Amino acid sequence: IFYGAMNRDTAMVELRLKVGDEITLMESERINKNDIPIFMEVGIKELIIGRNNRPEFNAKHKETFKKILDTDDKRKRYEMINAFLVNEITKIVPDDETYKYKATIGIAKNYLNNKQTAGMIYLSINRKETGCIAIRPESYHRYFKPSKCFKCRVDNIDTDDKRKRYEMINAFLV
Protein backbone atom coordinates (compact mmCIF):
# COMPACT_ATOMS: atom_id res chain seq x y z
CA ILE A 1 0.00 0.00 0.00
CA PHE A 2 1.21 3.50 -0.85
CA TYR A 3 0.52 5.99 1.92
CA GLY A 4 0.42 9.71 1.24
CA ALA A 5 -0.57 13.01 2.78
CA MET A 6 -2.20 16.15 1.40
CA ASN A 7 0.92 18.27 2.05
CA ARG A 8 4.52 18.10 3.29
CA ASP A 9 3.81 19.19 6.86
CA THR A 10 1.18 16.49 7.26
CA ALA A 11 3.54 13.82 5.87
CA MET A 12 6.19 14.82 8.40
CA VAL A 13 3.74 14.99 11.32
CA GLU A 14 2.37 11.55 10.40
CA LEU A 15 5.90 10.15 10.60
CA ARG A 16 6.39 11.71 14.08
CA LEU A 17 9.83 13.00 13.17
CA LYS A 18 12.32 14.39 15.64
CA VAL A 19 14.89 17.16 15.25
CA GLY A 20 17.82 15.78 13.26
CA ASP A 21 15.80 13.13 11.40
CA GLU A 22 16.43 12.96 7.66
CA ILE A 23 13.82 11.81 5.17
CA THR A 24 12.99 11.99 1.49
CA LEU A 25 9.58 13.36 0.55
CA MET A 26 8.03 12.72 -2.84
CA GLU A 27 5.30 14.87 -4.33
CA SER A 28 2.93 13.36 -6.87
CA GLU A 29 0.58 14.74 -9.48
CA ARG A 30 -2.27 13.22 -11.40
CA ILE A 31 -1.31 11.79 -14.78
CA ASN A 32 -4.57 12.76 -16.45
CA LYS A 33 -6.50 15.64 -14.88
CA ASN A 34 -9.76 14.22 -16.33
CA ASP A 35 -9.24 10.70 -14.93
CA ILE A 36 -10.19 11.20 -11.29
CA PRO A 37 -9.69 8.32 -8.84
CA ILE A 38 -12.56 7.30 -6.59
CA PHE A 39 -11.67 6.84 -2.94
CA MET A 40 -13.57 5.40 0.00
CA GLU A 41 -13.52 8.19 2.56
CA VAL A 42 -13.64 8.59 6.31
CA GLY A 43 -14.47 12.05 7.66
CA ILE A 44 -13.34 13.90 4.53
CA LYS A 45 -16.75 15.21 3.38
CA GLU A 46 -17.19 17.02 6.68
CA LEU A 47 -13.62 18.36 6.53
CA ILE A 48 -14.17 19.76 3.01
CA ILE A 49 -17.49 21.34 3.92
CA GLY A 50 -16.00 22.77 7.11
CA ARG A 51 -12.98 24.28 5.34
CA ASN A 52 -14.67 25.58 2.21
CA ASN A 53 -15.87 29.16 2.42
CA ARG A 54 -17.81 29.25 -0.86
CA PRO A 55 -21.51 29.34 0.07
CA GLU A 56 -22.60 27.68 -3.20
CA PHE A 57 -20.21 24.74 -2.57
CA ASN A 58 -21.46 24.22 0.98
CA ALA A 59 -25.11 24.58 -0.03
CA LYS A 60 -24.69 21.99 -2.83
CA HIS A 61 -23.01 19.43 -0.55
CA LYS A 62 -25.41 20.00 2.33
CA GLU A 63 -28.29 19.51 -0.12
CA THR A 64 -26.70 16.27 -1.38
CA PHE A 65 -26.36 15.00 2.20
CA LYS A 66 -29.96 15.99 2.89
CA LYS A 67 -31.20 13.95 -0.11
CA ILE A 68 -29.18 10.86 0.81
CA LEU A 69 -29.86 11.12 4.54
CA ASP A 70 -33.53 11.94 4.16
CA THR A 71 -34.75 10.71 7.54
CA ASP A 72 -33.70 11.36 11.11
CA ASP A 73 -32.85 7.68 11.49
CA LYS A 74 -30.51 7.70 8.46
CA ARG A 75 -28.79 10.89 9.65
CA LYS A 76 -28.25 9.49 13.14
CA ARG A 77 -26.93 6.18 11.79
CA TYR A 78 -24.57 7.99 9.40
CA GLU A 79 -23.29 10.27 12.18
CA MET A 80 -22.78 7.35 14.56
CA ILE A 81 -21.01 5.13 12.01
CA ASN A 82 -18.91 8.01 10.66
CA ALA A 83 -17.86 9.06 14.19
CA PHE A 84 -16.84 5.45 14.94
CA LEU A 85 -14.82 5.17 11.71
CA VAL A 86 -13.10 8.54 12.20
CA ASN A 87 -12.26 7.61 15.81
CA GLU A 88 -10.83 4.22 14.80
CA ILE A 89 -8.85 5.48 11.80
CA THR A 90 -7.37 8.47 13.64
CA LYS A 91 -6.53 6.94 17.02
CA ILE A 92 -2.91 6.99 18.08
CA VAL A 93 -1.69 3.65 19.36
CA PRO A 94 1.51 3.30 21.39
CA ASP A 95 4.23 1.12 19.83
CA ASP A 96 3.79 -1.56 22.50
CA GLU A 97 0.00 -1.78 22.02
CA THR A 98 -0.30 -2.46 18.28
CA TYR A 99 -3.08 -5.00 18.94
CA LYS A 100 -5.33 -1.91 19.29
CA TYR A 101 -5.03 -1.42 15.51
CA LYS A 102 -7.16 -4.54 14.88
CA ALA A 103 -10.36 -2.59 14.04
CA THR A 104 -8.41 -0.04 12.00
CA ILE A 105 -6.79 -2.83 9.98
CA GLY A 106 -10.19 -4.44 9.36
CA ILE A 107 -11.70 -1.14 8.18
CA ALA A 108 -8.72 -0.40 5.93
CA LYS A 109 -8.72 -3.92 4.42
CA ASN A 110 -12.42 -3.62 3.66
CA TYR A 111 -11.94 -0.23 1.99
CA LEU A 112 -8.75 -1.19 0.14
CA ASN A 113 -10.17 -4.47 -1.18
CA ASN A 114 -13.00 -2.63 -2.91
CA LYS A 115 -11.87 -2.94 -6.54
CA GLN A 116 -14.26 -0.15 -7.60
CA THR A 117 -12.09 2.38 -5.76
CA ALA A 118 -8.44 3.38 -5.89
CA GLY A 119 -8.03 3.26 -2.12
CA MET A 120 -9.10 5.27 0.87
CA ILE A 121 -8.81 8.87 1.97
CA TYR A 122 -9.06 9.67 5.65
CA LEU A 123 -8.38 12.34 8.24
CA SER A 124 -4.77 12.69 9.34
CA ILE A 125 -4.07 11.09 12.69
CA ASN A 126 -2.06 14.06 13.89
CA ARG A 127 -3.60 16.96 11.95
CA LYS A 128 -7.39 16.76 11.92
CA GLU A 129 -7.68 19.64 9.47
CA THR A 130 -6.16 17.68 6.58
CA GLY A 131 -6.19 14.24 5.03
CA CYS A 132 -4.09 11.25 4.02
CA ILE A 133 -4.51 8.50 1.46
CA ALA A 134 -3.83 4.80 1.34
CA ILE A 135 -3.83 3.58 -2.26
CA ARG A 136 -3.08 0.26 -3.91
CA PRO A 137 0.15 0.40 -5.97
CA GLU A 138 -1.65 -0.41 -9.25
CA SER A 139 -4.05 2.48 -8.60
CA TYR A 140 -1.21 4.86 -7.78
CA HIS A 141 0.49 4.03 -11.08
CA ARG A 142 -2.78 4.42 -12.99
CA TYR A 143 -3.63 7.85 -11.61
CA PHE A 144 -0.42 9.44 -10.29
CA LYS A 145 3.21 10.01 -11.10
CA PRO A 146 6.07 11.42 -9.03
CA SER A 147 6.66 15.10 -9.74
CA LYS A 148 9.24 16.25 -7.17
CA CYS A 149 11.43 14.69 -4.57
CA PHE A 150 13.00 16.47 -1.60
CA LYS A 151 15.67 15.27 0.77
CA CYS A 152 15.06 16.92 4.12
CA ARG A 153 16.50 17.14 7.58
CA VAL A 154 14.31 18.39 10.40
CA ASP A 155 16.02 21.42 11.91
CA ASN A 156 13.24 22.68 14.15
CA ILE A 157 9.77 21.69 15.25
CA ASP A 158 7.59 24.72 15.89
CA THR A 159 5.48 23.62 18.84
CA ASP A 160 3.86 27.06 19.15
CA ASP A 161 1.89 26.23 16.02
CA LYS A 162 -1.05 24.00 17.01
CA ARG A 163 -0.59 22.07 13.75
CA LYS A 164 3.07 21.34 14.54
CA ARG A 165 5.02 22.76 11.61
CA TYR A 166 8.40 21.38 10.68
CA GLU A 167 11.19 23.54 9.37
CA MET A 168 13.31 21.69 6.88
CA ILE A 169 16.86 22.46 5.94
CA ASN A 170 18.86 20.95 3.12
CA ALA A 171 15.66 20.72 1.09
CA PHE A 172 16.39 20.45 -2.59
CA LEU A 173 14.81 19.20 -5.76
CA VAL A 174 16.31 15.90 -6.85
Image (cartoon, rainbow, N blue to C red):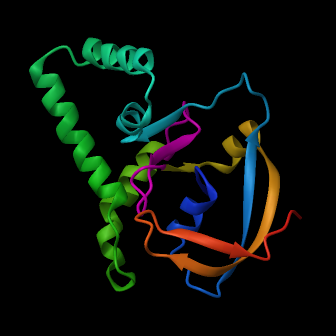
Q: What residue is at 30 percent from the left and 20 percent from the top?
A: 65
Please name whichever residue, 20 or 74, is drawn nearer the observer in this view of the structure: 20
Q: Left or right? Give the position of 169 relative to 174.
A: left
Kindly indicate the quadrant of the structure image that contains residue 54: top left
Q: Position of residue 34 (x, y in %)?
A: 72, 21
Which quarter of the rendered picture does the C terminus lie within? Answer: bottom right
Q: Is residue 60 above or below residue 162?
A: above
Please name whichever residue, 2 or 10, is drawn nearer the observer in this view of the structure: 10
Q: Left or right? Give the position of 36 relative to 174.
A: left
Q: Position of residue 97 (x, y in %)?
A: 32, 80
Residue at the far right in the pictured view: 174
Q: How many marks?
A: 0
Q: What residue is at 42 percent from the left and 50 percent from the top?
A: 129
Please name whichever residue, 16 or 42, is drawn nearer the observer in this view of the structure: 16
> What residue range appears in magenta?
112-130
The question of residue 121 being in magenta is answered with yes
Q: What residue is at 41 percent from the left and 39 percent from the top?
A: 44
Query: Taken as a whole, is the magenta stretch helix, strand or loop?
Result: loop
Please name whichever residue, 66 or 162, is drawn nearer the observer in this view of the structure: 162
Q: Position of residue 66 (x, y in %)?
A: 25, 15
Which quarter of the rendered picture does the N terminus lie within? Answer: bottom right
Kindly indicate the quadrant of the structure image that contains residue 57: top left
Q: What residue is at 43 percent from the left and 52 percent from the top?
A: 108
Q: Is residue 31 above or below residue 72?
A: below
The question of residue 93 being in magenta is answered with no
Q: Is residue 86 above or below residue 117?
A: below
Q: Left or right? Give the position of 137 relative to 32.
A: left
Q: Left or right? Give the position of 119 relative to 24.
A: left
Residue at the far front in the pictured view: 160
